[in-house]
C-alpha cells in the first residue's frame, strides 16, 4: 500500500514538492500531480508548448532574473490553497518533443529556479532538483559563457547569428514574471 506522497512510478517524483525533468515528456511525468509548472528554456528557441502541458497546472515561462519572483508566486499559490503546493520545474531541451543532448542553458535556468525556491524555504526537492540547483550554484558566475559556449548556444549563433545569443541572454536576465496560465483555485 502506498501513501499519498509515494508514487508507484518513481519517474513522477511525487514524493517531492520540487521536481525536475527534461522536455515535454518530462513535463507530463512530473506535472501530472503538480500545481505549478515552470518551463525553463534558456535560449527560447521554441514557443512554450502550453496546449501540450497538463491542463490543470499554472504555467510560468521562466527567466533567471525572475527566479525570486517565481519562488514568491509558489508561496502565494500555496497560501491561497492552504496546503502544500507541488512544483514541476522543466528544462525544455531541444526539440521539446524529444530533446537531444544535454540542454546546459535550460538546466542552469532550472537550477536557478530550484535555488530560489530553496531560498524561501521550499526545499523538499527531488535528487534531480538538488543536482540542478547545485549545478547553478557552482556555475552562476559563468552563465554568460555557458549560454554562448553550450551546444545550444553555438547552434543558435550558427543558425541566427551572434545577436540571437545576446537577445537570449537579455531574456535570461529579465526580471519579468511571465505567467502563461494561472492555477484555477476553484477546480
Image: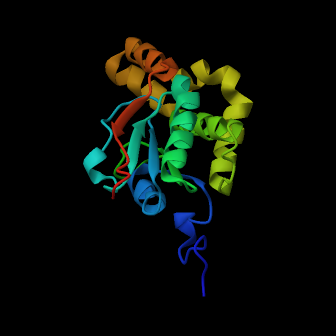
* Residue 92 % position (x, y): 43, 43
The C terminus lies in which quarter of the figure?
Answer: bottom left
Q: Residue at x 69, y 41 (%)?
A: 118
**Residue toward you, 160 or 169:** 169
User: Residue 32 lies in what quarter of the image?
Assistant: bottom left
Indicate whether 105 appears above or below 149: below
* Residue 175 % position (x, y): 50, 20
- Would residue 85 appear left or right of 116 to someone viewing this image? left
Identity of the residue furthest to the bottom in this view: 1
Identity of the residue furthest to the left in this view: 51
Q: Residue at x 57, y 74 (%)?
A: 4
Q: Residue at x 64, y 43 (%)?
A: 132
Indicate whether 110 appears above or below 15: above
**Residue toward you, 153 or 87:** 87
* Residue 171 % position (x, y): 44, 20
User: How many numbered marks does the figure carry?
Assistant: 0
* Residue 111 % position (x, y): 61, 38
Indicate whether 159 appears above or below 23: above
User: Residue 180 lies in what quarter of the image?
Assistant: top left
Asked which colour scheme the image uses, the reply is: rainbow
User: Residue 41 lies in what quarter of the image?
Assistant: top left
**Residue toward you, 67 or 76:** 76
- Would residue 59 appear left or right of 115 to someone viewing this image? left
The N terminus lies in which quarter of the figure?
Answer: bottom right
Q: Residue at x 54, y 48 (%)?
A: 78
Amino acid at each position: 500500500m502506498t501513501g499519498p506522497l509515494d508514487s508507484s512510478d518513481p519517474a513522477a517524483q511525487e514524493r517531492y514538492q520540487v521536481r525536475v525533468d527534461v522536455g515535454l515528456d518530462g513535463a507530463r511525468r512530473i506535472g501530472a500531480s503538480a500545481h505549478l509548472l515552470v518551463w525553463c528554456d534558456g535560449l527560447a528557441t521554441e514557443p512554450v508548448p502550453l496546449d501540450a502541458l497538463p491542463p490543470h497546472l499554472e504555467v510560468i515561462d521562466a527567466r533567471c532574473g525572475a527566479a525570486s519572483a517565481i519562488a514568491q508566486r509558489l508561496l502565494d499559490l500555496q497560501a491561497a490553497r492552504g496546503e502544500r503546493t507541488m512544483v514541476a520545474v522543466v528544462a525544455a531541451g531541444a526539440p521539446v518533443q524529444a530533446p537531444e543532448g544535454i540542454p546546459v542553458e535550460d538546466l542552469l535556468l532550472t537550477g536557478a529556479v530550484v535555488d530560489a525556491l530553496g531560498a524561501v524555504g521550499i526545499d523538499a526537492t527531488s535528487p534531480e532538483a538538488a543536482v540542478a540547483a547545485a549545478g547553478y550554484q557552482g556555475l552562476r558566475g559563468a552563465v554568460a559563457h555557458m549560454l554562448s559556449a553550450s551546444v545550444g548556444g553555438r547552434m543558435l549563433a550558427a543558425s541566427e547569428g551572434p545577436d540571437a545569443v545576446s537577445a537570449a541572454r537579455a531574456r535570461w536576465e529579465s526580471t519579468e514574471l511571465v505567467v502563461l496560465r494561472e492555477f484555477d483555485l476553484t477546480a
